[in-house]
Amino acid sequence: MKENKEKIDLLIEKNAAEQFSQINWEQLNSAISGKLDNAQQKESSSIKFPSWLKIAASIAIVAAILFTVTIILEKQQNIPLDNDRTAEVQLAESKGGASVQIQTTSANSKVTIELGNKKELAKCDVEIIDMNGESSAKATWIIISRPQPIYADNEINQDMMDIMYLF
Amino acid sequence: MKIKEELQLVKAAREGDRAAFNELVRLYQKQAMQVAVRMLGDAEEAAEAVQAGFLNAFLNIGKLKEPEYFKVWLLRIISNAAITQARATKRREKKVNIVEPVRKNIIPSPSDRESSKELKEAIQKAMIKLSKKEAKAISLFSMDDLPLKEVAEIMNCSVSSAKWYVFQARKKLKVLLKDYL
């Protein structure tokens, strides 16, 4: 292969030879040794865990991730809306607890959130995402129902206050 | 050194024998520098790459399954370290914005020390413009003691592919360094 060298190869060789003449081999060797020493020191000073512990830790981490993903997925529900459109509900529960129930009793689909019978306010974040990405001309509703609506004592129409107008 | 003795060194180094690895460094540092100098065009940059390469080899020699391929394995690591070094140099140059055109107007005299420096800089800049495979191919190909089969093995490709990369590299370098030819 070497007999068919071209001018460009010779030019590279010429420069390489020039550069080679400047190399202090002893210095290079000690620099490499120094790097290897440092690496060895770091290796010996770092805490070494047995391999079974590393495997167990890895399994635990993977299990935790899978559990979290499952929980997140379980909290998402696809809701059929009118005209074959679908939406996704993401529900974040807090101390009051909440459940989502999909009702298809009318043309517009509804999501009912049961907040339980505790008197204090239960924080409930609900997000409905229009999967088709279209702005809706028709209303989509979330009905929040409670055994004793908090606004009832204030003489405000509880039905109005308990309905969140989303789109 | 006989191949058998070299194999023993590699096996010992794989078991964590530091003295054996030091011996391998001593055995291969010149070849490693030949690869790096050709790829980077500069002895100082090449020394950096070779140090990083040997460190990488030291940390990973336990993973080397076939000790007889140590040379190919090592030179592959060295050439990759040279690529990394070249990228770092390129980034530095971009940062300080001192990139100059590779071509120059005056043809340097070969005996002139200054012209050697210019040639070095021109080769450095030209090599950066090649692809990784092309830079590796032309650098390894120009080494007399490296058969084409080993060049291909280091590059992890077929012999014909290695030849193709050499051809492409030459084609580009002829344009980039035409004032020096």
Image: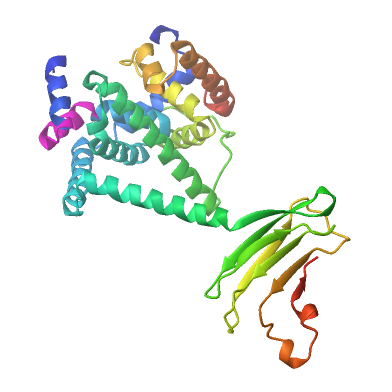
Query: What span is colored magenta in the figure?
Result: B14-28
Horizontal side of A136 relative to B110 (left or right) equals: right
Q: Residue at x 72, y 91 (%)?
A: A153
Relative side of B117 to B10, left or right: right
Q: Residue furthest bottom?
A: A154
Q: Position of residue A129 (x, y in %)?
A: 72, 58
Residue B21 belongs to the span the image colors magenta: yes
Q: Position of residue A162 (x, y in %)?
A: 74, 77
Q: Position of residue B97 (x, y in %)?
A: 56, 51
Q: Is residue A29 above or below residue A120?
A: above
Q: Is residue A138 visible?
A: yes
Q: Colour scheme in the image?
A: rainbow
Q: Quadrant of residue B178?
A: top right
Q: Is residue A23 rendered to the left or right of residue B21? A: right
Residue at (63, 61) in percent of width and height: A90
Tell me the chief SS of the magenta region: helix
How many discs mark residues in the rendered view? 0
Left or right, A140 with reference to B82: right
Q: Can the viewer see residue B41?
A: no
Which residue occupies 79% across, 59% down? A105
